[in-house]
Image: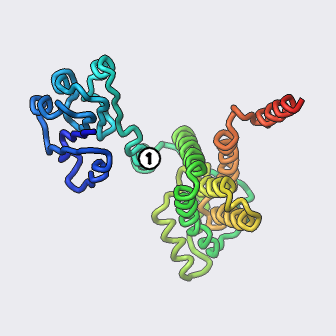
Amino acid sequence: MKIIFLDAKTIGEDMDLSGYETLGEVVKYDFSTPQEASQRVKDADVIIVNKVPVNEETIKTAENLKLVCVAATGTNNLDKEYLEKRGIAWRNVAGYSTECVTQHAFALLFYLLERVCRPERYHVMYTALDDVIPFHELFVIPYVFWFLYLIGIHCYTAKRDAAAFRRLMAFVVVSHTCALAIFFLFPTCQHLRPLVFPRDNVLTDIVAFFYRIDTSTNVCPSLHVVGSMAVWYGAKDTKLFAHRGWRVFFLLATASICLSTVFLKQHSVLDVAAGLLLSHVVYRLVYHPVREGFLGLGRRAERRRRISRRA
Protein backbone atom coordinates (compact mmCIF):
# COMPACT_ATOMS: atom_id res chain seq x y z
CA MET A 1 0.00 0.00 0.00
CA LYS A 2 1.35 3.41 -0.96
CA ILE A 3 0.52 6.39 1.25
CA ILE A 4 1.12 9.92 -0.05
CA PHE A 5 1.17 12.90 2.34
CA LEU A 6 0.79 15.94 0.11
CA ASP A 7 1.41 18.79 2.60
CA ALA A 8 3.09 17.37 5.69
CA LYS A 9 4.66 20.68 6.77
CA THR A 10 1.25 22.31 7.22
CA ILE A 11 0.53 20.29 10.37
CA GLY A 12 3.79 21.38 12.03
CA GLU A 13 7.39 20.28 11.94
CA ASP A 14 7.26 18.67 15.40
CA MET A 15 4.75 15.97 14.42
CA ASP A 16 5.93 12.36 14.50
CA LEU A 17 4.61 10.68 11.35
CA SER A 18 6.64 7.50 11.69
CA GLY A 19 3.54 5.49 12.61
CA TYR A 20 2.36 5.64 9.02
CA GLU A 21 5.42 3.66 7.93
CA THR A 22 4.07 0.55 9.65
CA LEU A 23 1.10 0.60 7.27
CA GLY A 24 2.97 0.66 3.98
CA GLU A 25 5.25 2.74 1.77
CA VAL A 26 5.04 6.41 2.79
CA VAL A 27 6.01 9.37 0.63
CA LYS A 28 5.88 12.81 2.26
CA TYR A 29 5.85 16.16 0.47
CA ASP A 30 6.22 19.38 2.42
CA PHE A 31 3.76 21.27 0.22
CA SER A 32 1.88 20.57 -3.01
CA THR A 33 0.10 22.79 -5.50
CA PRO A 34 -2.97 21.34 -7.25
CA GLN A 35 -0.88 20.78 -10.36
CA GLU A 36 1.87 19.00 -8.40
CA ALA A 37 -0.70 16.93 -6.51
CA SER A 38 -2.11 15.59 -9.75
CA GLN A 39 1.30 14.16 -10.67
CA ARG A 40 2.24 12.93 -7.20
CA VAL A 41 -0.86 10.81 -6.48
CA LYS A 42 -0.78 8.69 -9.65
CA ASP A 43 0.10 5.44 -7.89
CA ALA A 44 -1.33 6.27 -4.42
CA ASP A 45 -3.65 3.95 -2.54
CA VAL A 46 -4.15 6.48 0.28
CA ILE A 47 -3.53 10.20 0.31
CA ILE A 48 -3.31 12.41 3.40
CA VAL A 49 -3.95 16.13 3.09
CA ASN A 50 -4.50 19.14 5.27
CA LYS A 51 -5.02 22.11 2.95
CA VAL A 52 -4.62 20.66 -0.54
CA PRO A 53 -7.94 20.55 -2.44
CA VAL A 54 -9.10 17.07 -3.40
CA ASN A 55 -11.20 17.14 -6.53
CA GLU A 56 -11.25 15.85 -10.09
CA GLU A 57 -8.34 18.10 -11.08
CA THR A 58 -6.01 16.87 -8.33
CA ILE A 59 -6.82 13.14 -8.17
CA LYS A 60 -8.11 12.18 -11.62
CA THR A 61 -4.78 10.42 -12.30
CA ALA A 62 -4.98 8.34 -9.09
CA GLU A 63 -6.48 5.16 -10.49
CA ASN A 64 -5.70 3.05 -7.38
CA LEU A 65 -6.92 5.57 -4.81
CA LYS A 66 -9.12 4.04 -2.13
CA LEU A 67 -9.02 6.48 0.79
CA VAL A 68 -8.53 10.22 1.39
CA CYS A 69 -7.57 11.26 4.94
CA VAL A 70 -7.85 14.87 6.08
CA ALA A 71 -5.48 15.75 8.92
CA ALA A 72 -8.00 18.27 10.27
CA THR A 73 -11.66 18.61 11.22
CA GLY A 74 -12.86 20.70 8.26
CA THR A 75 -13.58 18.96 4.96
CA ASN A 76 -14.34 21.97 2.78
CA ASN A 77 -11.33 21.07 0.61
CA LEU A 78 -12.94 17.77 -0.44
CA ASP A 79 -15.20 17.35 -3.46
CA LYS A 80 -17.37 14.73 -1.76
CA GLU A 81 -19.64 14.22 -4.76
CA TYR A 82 -16.68 13.35 -6.95
CA LEU A 83 -15.24 11.01 -4.29
CA GLU A 84 -18.59 9.25 -3.95
CA LYS A 85 -18.88 8.95 -7.71
CA ARG A 86 -15.54 7.14 -7.82
CA GLY A 87 -16.23 5.07 -4.72
CA ILE A 88 -13.36 6.63 -2.75
CA ALA A 89 -13.81 6.78 1.02
CA TRP A 90 -12.75 9.81 3.09
CA ARG A 91 -12.07 10.39 6.77
CA ASN A 92 -11.30 13.43 8.90
CA VAL A 93 -10.30 14.13 12.52
CA ALA A 94 -13.92 14.38 13.63
CA GLY A 95 -13.37 14.95 17.36
CA TYR A 96 -10.42 17.30 17.17
CA SER A 97 -10.26 19.78 20.11
CA THR A 98 -13.95 19.35 21.01
CA GLU A 99 -13.19 19.40 24.74
CA CYS A 100 -10.93 22.46 24.46
CA VAL A 101 -13.54 24.40 22.50
CA THR A 102 -16.18 23.56 25.11
CA GLN A 103 -13.94 24.66 27.96
CA HIS A 104 -13.03 27.89 26.18
CA ALA A 105 -16.71 28.64 25.50
CA PHE A 106 -17.58 28.21 29.18
CA ALA A 107 -14.64 30.39 30.22
CA LEU A 108 -15.79 33.16 27.87
CA LEU A 109 -19.37 32.92 29.14
CA PHE A 110 -18.28 33.21 32.77
CA TYR A 111 -16.05 36.17 31.89
CA LEU A 112 -18.93 37.80 30.04
CA LEU A 113 -21.20 37.18 33.00
CA GLU A 114 -18.86 38.55 35.69
CA ARG A 115 -16.90 41.27 33.88
CA VAL A 116 -18.91 42.54 30.92
CA CYS A 117 -22.69 42.07 31.20
CA ARG A 118 -23.31 43.31 34.72
CA PRO A 119 -27.05 43.63 35.41
CA GLU A 120 -28.52 46.77 36.95
CA ARG A 121 -30.04 44.79 39.81
CA TYR A 122 -29.08 41.61 41.65
CA HIS A 123 -31.45 39.52 43.73
CA VAL A 124 -30.04 39.20 47.26
CA MET A 125 -29.92 35.62 48.52
CA TYR A 126 -30.69 35.52 52.22
CA THR A 127 -32.62 33.48 54.77
CA ALA A 128 -32.84 33.83 58.55
CA LEU A 129 -30.93 30.57 58.89
CA ASP A 130 -27.85 32.31 57.47
CA ASP A 131 -27.67 34.46 60.63
CA VAL A 132 -27.66 31.36 62.83
CA ILE A 133 -24.67 29.80 61.06
CA PRO A 134 -21.42 31.30 62.43
CA PHE A 135 -18.34 32.10 60.37
CA HIS A 136 -15.44 29.72 60.96
CA GLU A 137 -12.20 29.75 59.02
CA LEU A 138 -11.53 26.03 59.59
CA PHE A 139 -13.97 25.31 56.78
CA VAL A 140 -11.54 26.83 54.31
CA ILE A 141 -9.76 23.44 54.39
CA PRO A 142 -12.60 21.48 52.72
CA TYR A 143 -13.34 24.56 50.60
CA VAL A 144 -9.82 24.48 49.10
CA PHE A 145 -9.87 20.67 48.96
CA TRP A 146 -12.73 21.04 46.46
CA PHE A 147 -10.22 21.89 43.72
CA LEU A 148 -8.22 18.69 44.29
CA TYR A 149 -11.49 16.79 44.63
CA LEU A 150 -12.59 17.80 41.14
CA ILE A 151 -9.19 17.27 39.54
CA GLY A 152 -8.84 13.86 41.17
CA ILE A 153 -12.11 12.36 39.92
CA HIS A 154 -11.58 13.74 36.42
CA CYS A 155 -8.06 12.32 36.20
CA TYR A 156 -9.06 8.93 37.62
CA THR A 157 -12.10 8.38 35.41
CA ALA A 158 -10.32 9.69 32.30
CA LYS A 159 -7.53 7.17 32.83
CA ARG A 160 -9.39 4.18 34.27
CA ASP A 161 -13.07 4.37 33.30
CA ALA A 162 -13.90 6.08 30.00
CA ALA A 163 -17.65 5.48 30.26
CA ALA A 164 -17.79 6.99 33.75
CA PHE A 165 -15.69 9.93 32.54
CA ARG A 166 -18.12 10.64 29.69
CA ARG A 167 -21.09 10.61 32.07
CA LEU A 168 -19.21 12.82 34.52
CA MET A 169 -18.41 15.35 31.78
CA ALA A 170 -22.02 15.24 30.60
CA PHE A 171 -23.13 16.07 34.14
CA VAL A 172 -20.65 18.96 34.37
CA VAL A 173 -21.60 20.41 30.98
CA VAL A 174 -25.37 20.16 31.53
CA SER A 175 -25.28 21.44 35.12
CA HIS A 176 -23.01 24.38 34.29
CA THR A 177 -25.09 25.26 31.23
CA CYS A 178 -28.20 25.34 33.41
CA ALA A 179 -26.37 27.40 36.05
CA LEU A 180 -25.20 29.90 33.44
CA ALA A 181 -28.74 30.26 32.13
CA ILE A 182 -29.97 30.92 35.68
CA PHE A 183 -27.20 33.47 36.30
CA PHE A 184 -28.15 35.39 33.15
CA LEU A 185 -31.91 35.25 33.74
CA PHE A 186 -31.90 35.61 37.53
CA PRO A 187 -28.70 37.37 38.66
CA THR A 188 -28.04 36.97 42.35
CA CYS A 189 -25.67 38.20 45.03
CA GLN A 190 -25.07 37.83 48.76
CA HIS A 191 -24.03 40.22 51.56
CA LEU A 192 -23.02 37.65 54.17
CA ARG A 193 -19.25 38.12 54.30
CA PRO A 194 -17.98 39.53 57.60
CA LEU A 195 -16.37 42.96 57.46
CA VAL A 196 -13.90 41.94 60.17
CA PHE A 197 -12.73 38.40 60.90
CA PRO A 198 -13.19 37.21 64.49
CA ARG A 199 -9.66 35.79 64.44
CA ASP A 200 -6.41 36.57 62.67
CA ASN A 201 -4.49 33.53 61.40
CA VAL A 202 -3.30 31.78 58.29
CA LEU A 203 -6.74 30.35 57.54
CA THR A 204 -8.43 33.74 57.67
CA ASP A 205 -5.71 35.04 55.34
CA ILE A 206 -6.69 32.34 52.85
CA VAL A 207 -10.37 33.25 53.23
CA ALA A 208 -9.49 36.91 52.63
CA PHE A 209 -7.67 35.87 49.46
CA PHE A 210 -10.78 34.10 48.16
CA TYR A 211 -12.91 37.12 49.05
CA ARG A 212 -10.63 39.27 46.90
CA ILE A 213 -10.62 37.06 43.81
CA ASP A 214 -14.14 35.64 44.00
CA THR A 215 -17.05 38.01 43.47
CA SER A 216 -20.15 37.69 45.64
CA THR A 217 -22.41 37.72 42.58
CA ASN A 218 -24.12 34.91 40.67
CA VAL A 219 -24.13 32.72 43.73
CA CYS A 220 -27.35 30.74 43.25
CA PRO A 221 -27.03 27.86 42.58
CA SER A 222 -23.68 27.29 44.25
CA LEU A 223 -21.17 25.88 41.76
CA HIS A 224 -19.09 24.63 44.67
CA VAL A 225 -22.04 22.43 45.63
CA VAL A 226 -22.70 21.37 42.02
CA GLY A 227 -19.03 20.49 41.56
CA SER A 228 -18.98 18.47 44.77
CA MET A 229 -22.07 16.55 43.72
CA ALA A 230 -20.45 15.89 40.35
CA VAL A 231 -17.59 14.17 42.16
CA TRP A 232 -19.99 12.22 44.38
CA TYR A 233 -22.02 10.95 41.42
CA GLY A 234 -18.88 10.28 39.39
CA ALA A 235 -17.34 8.26 42.22
CA LYS A 236 -20.50 6.18 42.67
CA ASP A 237 -20.38 5.41 38.96
CA THR A 238 -17.00 3.63 39.19
CA LYS A 239 -16.33 0.10 40.39
CA LEU A 240 -13.46 1.02 42.73
CA PHE A 241 -15.20 3.88 44.52
CA ALA A 242 -18.47 1.96 44.78
CA HIS A 243 -17.06 0.09 47.82
CA ARG A 244 -18.50 1.04 51.20
CA GLY A 245 -15.32 2.62 52.59
CA TRP A 246 -14.84 4.87 49.59
CA ARG A 247 -18.51 5.83 49.63
CA VAL A 248 -18.24 6.98 53.23
CA PHE A 249 -15.17 9.07 52.33
CA PHE A 250 -16.83 10.70 49.34
CA LEU A 251 -20.04 11.32 51.29
CA LEU A 252 -18.17 13.05 54.13
CA ALA A 253 -15.99 15.02 51.71
CA THR A 254 -18.98 16.18 49.67
CA ALA A 255 -20.97 17.13 52.79
CA SER A 256 -18.06 19.06 54.33
CA ILE A 257 -17.45 20.99 51.10
CA CYS A 258 -21.12 21.93 50.84
CA LEU A 259 -21.13 23.04 54.49
CA SER A 260 -17.94 25.03 53.99
CA THR A 261 -19.69 27.40 51.60
CA VAL A 262 -22.10 28.61 54.28
CA PHE A 263 -19.62 28.61 57.20
CA LEU A 264 -17.23 30.74 55.15
CA LYS A 265 -20.12 33.03 54.19
CA GLN A 266 -19.52 32.41 50.52
CA HIS A 267 -23.11 31.28 50.02
CA SER A 268 -26.52 31.43 51.56
CA VAL A 269 -28.35 28.27 52.57
CA LEU A 270 -30.63 29.02 49.60
CA ASP A 271 -27.67 28.74 47.22
CA VAL A 272 -26.73 25.37 48.65
CA ALA A 273 -30.31 24.11 48.40
CA ALA A 274 -30.55 25.29 44.79
CA GLY A 275 -27.23 23.61 44.00
CA LEU A 276 -28.42 20.33 45.47
CA LEU A 277 -31.72 20.53 43.59
CA LEU A 278 -30.03 21.31 40.27
CA SER A 279 -27.54 18.48 40.82
CA HIS A 280 -30.31 15.99 41.52
CA VAL A 281 -32.26 16.96 38.39
CA VAL A 282 -29.19 16.74 36.15
CA TYR A 283 -28.19 13.46 37.81
CA ARG A 284 -31.53 11.96 36.83
CA LEU A 285 -31.08 13.16 33.26
CA VAL A 286 -27.49 11.99 32.84
CA TYR A 287 -27.24 8.84 34.92
CA HIS A 288 -30.86 7.68 34.61
CA PRO A 289 -31.97 8.89 31.16
CA VAL A 290 -35.59 8.89 30.01
CA ARG A 291 -35.10 5.82 27.87
CA GLU A 292 -34.51 3.81 31.06
CA GLY A 293 -37.41 5.51 32.82
CA PHE A 294 -37.32 7.83 35.81
CA LEU A 295 -39.46 5.33 37.71
CA GLY A 296 -37.44 2.30 36.70
CA LEU A 297 -39.86 1.37 33.91
CA GLY A 298 -36.97 0.25 31.73
CA ARG A 299 -35.79 -2.16 34.40
CA ARG A 300 -39.33 -3.48 34.89
CA ALA A 301 -39.69 -4.07 31.16
CA GLU A 302 -36.38 -5.93 31.16
CA ARG A 303 -37.58 -8.14 34.03
CA ARG A 304 -40.77 -8.90 32.12
CA ARG A 305 -38.75 -9.89 29.05
CA ARG A 306 -36.61 -12.23 31.16
CA ILE A 307 -39.71 -13.87 32.66
CA SER A 308 -41.27 -14.32 29.20
CA ARG A 309 -38.07 -15.99 27.97
CA ARG A 310 -38.12 -18.46 30.86
CA ALA A 311 -41.77 -19.24 30.15
Q: Is residue 24 visible?
A: yes
Side of 82 where 300 appears, left or right: right
Image location of residue 221, percent across then percent down: 61, 49
Question: Which residue does the image show at 83% across and 34% down from the upper left?
Answer: 306
| Residue 75 versus residue 242 in the image, above or below | above
Question: Which residue does the image show at 54% across and 45% down from the upper left?
Answer: 173
| Residue 250 versus residue 270 in the image, above or below | below
Judging depth in this view, the residue of 140 and 300 nearest the camera is 300
Q: Looking at the rendering, which quadrant does residue 80 occupy? A: top left
Crowdedness near tag 1: few (<14), some (14–19) or many (≥20) residues, C-alpha within 10 Å? few
Tell me the element at label 1: helix
The colour mode here is rainbow
Quadrant (top left/top right/bottom left/bottom right) for the C terminus: top right
Residue type at tag 1? Glu
Q: Point out the residue furthest to the bottom here.
A: 201
Q: Point out the residue furthest to the right here.
A: 311
| Residue 176 versus residue 195 in the image, above or below | above
Image location of residue 102, percent across then percent down: 44, 44
Question: Which residue does the image show at 62% across and 57% down from the upper left?
Answer: 231
Which residue, given by chain and number where applicable, does mark 1 sit on? 99
Q: Looking at the rendering, which quadrant does residue 268 occupy? A: bottom right
Image location of residue 183, percent across then percent down: 54, 44
Judging depth in this view, the residue of 172 and 27 nearest the camera is 27
Side of 109 where 279 appears, left or right: right
Image location of residue 125, percent across then percent down: 63, 51
Q: Is residue 188 visible?
A: no
